[in-house]
Image (cartoon, rainbow, N blue to C red):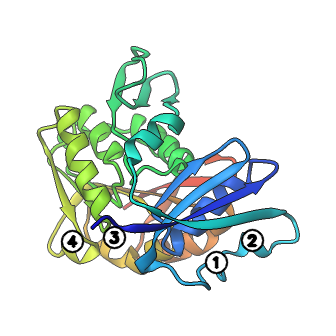
Amino acid sequence: MDNIYIEYNFTFSPKEPISEILIAELGNVGFESFVETENGVTAYIQKTDWSAEILADVFVLNSDEFSIEYNLNEVPQTNWNAEWEKNFEPIQVDDLVSIRAPFHENPNLKYDIVIEPKMSFGTGHHETTHMMVQHLLQLDLENKKVLDMGCGTGILAIFAEMKGAKPLDAIDIDNWCYENSIENVTRNNCENISVYEGDATLLVDKKYDVIIANINRNILLMDMKVYTNCLQEGGILLLSGFYEQDIPVIDAEVSKYGLKLEKFIQRNNWVALKYNN
């Protein structure tokens, strides 16, 4: 039997920064998929994961600063790819990297990443993905062992392999992301990426030259010790998935393990940090 989903239709103005904040907060409480619409955002959560109080911890909805309206209804599992095809926009980074779906025209940049944007690709990740790609562009990844933690569609692992990294591990706790990453690794003819379904418990006795973790703040804080233990001497830790105001708490946690903040990139209110071991 198809899964039943609860669909929320949020409307608000202006689109930014409300859209990015709302998507991030909804993701934290269990929403799986987001489609940005002309007037707001449509979000989906499986009925089995839903409760009537699901929005109680979505702080932006209680903010006096923004006015957000919504309605909800039940929908059967649908053709998510068709939904994404209508809404997914390609990304270009520094005129060097394109991240696009198969139905988009190839802009013929130096690096071209083609993904099939299933449920695991939320448009809320555009800012963080963009910044992480910018960090990776600056790194020498030739023959470096890389971890992409919270890999989503596998974009960052795929790009790292294009830059010469090997071997690579891509891990995500979400089954949609796991399956989608496997498909996208194959679609981009990657030969050195292993994809795993799970969390930081998979990292026992692992060591990496570069660790990429584009996840929400609470997960990063919870698993930071594991990430730093997995980092080779002289290694690089790239973190994103949180806001500028979260930098002090993230930096305080990372600093416990002797890493130094070298650089950060900001897009709107999102940030991506680079640490050296």
Dot 3 falls on a residue whose secondary structure is helix
Q: Amino acid at mark 3?
A: Thr
What label does residue 61 carry, if any? Answer: 2
Location of mark 4 (residue): 203
Q: Which comes sooner in the sequence, label 3 or label 2?
A: 2
Image position, residue 34 (x, y; %): 53, 54
Image position, residue 242 (x, y; %): 57, 62
Structural crowding at the residue carrying mark 3, measured as other residues with C-alpha within 10 Å and reported as few (<14), some (14–19) or many (≥20): many
Residue 243 seen in the current view: no
Measure the alpha-carbon separation of dots 1 and 4. 33 Å
Q: Which comes sooner in the sequence, label 4 or label 3?
A: 4
Measure the alpha-carbon separation of dots 2 and 4. 36 Å
| Quarter of the image where the C terminus is located | bottom left
Residue 260 seen in the current view: yes
Image position, residue 205 (x, y; %): 14, 73
Q: Which comes sooner in the sequence, label 3 or label 1?
A: 1
Location of mark 3 (residue): 228
Location of mark 1 (residue): 55
Q: Amino acid at mark 4?
A: Leu
Disc 1 to disc 2: CB gap under 8 Å: yes
Q: Amino acid at mark 1?
A: Leu
